[in-house]
Image (cartoon, rainbow, N blue to C red):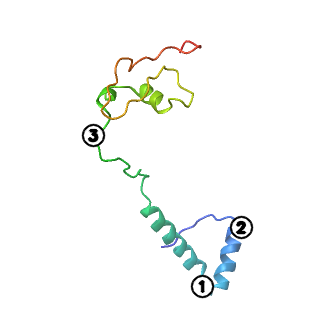
Amino acid sequence: MKTTIEISDALMGQARRLAARENTTLHALVEQGLRIVIADKGQSTDFRMRRASFKGKGLQTPLQDAGWERLRDIVYEGRGGHRCEVPPFPRAGEDWGEGINTCKPDESGK
């Protein structure tokens, strides 16, 4: 099949020099390049994050209904950056007691 394409002068010059050096035709180089690009694009898939879950039973019972803010506060407990008074994180089997949701507005009122 014959077709017409526009190629920049600089790229055409590089292609002609490569064809001469490789003892091939410009036609063959264009076909080879298109095959490589098509094969590469055909193999790419959408990014998928690998499964990184751990065996277990999910969140501990007192936290199953906790929102993201509460979970974040526990994660950052003792590291600054949280607005809530977070009770000490209990060890497995210990009672959470009262105060699971003790978030109070910070100085800015948020």
Mark 1 or 3: in front is 3
For numbered disc 3, what is the local secondary structure?
Answer: loop
Q: Residues within 10 Å of mark 3 (few under 14, many from 20)?
A: few
> Disc 2 marks which residue?
9
At a point 66% along the width and 79% down the height, the residue shown is 18
- Residue 10, position as x, y percentages in the image: 72, 67
Pointer 3: what residue?
57
- Relative to residue 19, is residue 46 depicted above or below? above
Q: CA distance from mark 1 to mark 3?
A: 64 Å
> Disc 1 designates what residue?
24
Residue at image position (65%, 74%) is: 15
**Amino acid at pointer 3:** Lys
At numbered mark 2, what does the secondary structure look like: helix, strand or loop?
A: helix
**Nearer to us in this view, 13 or 55:** 55
Left or right, 4 with respect to 54, comes to right
Q: Earlier in the sequence, mark 1 or mark 3?
A: 1
Q: Earlier in the sequence, mark 3 or mark 2?
A: 2
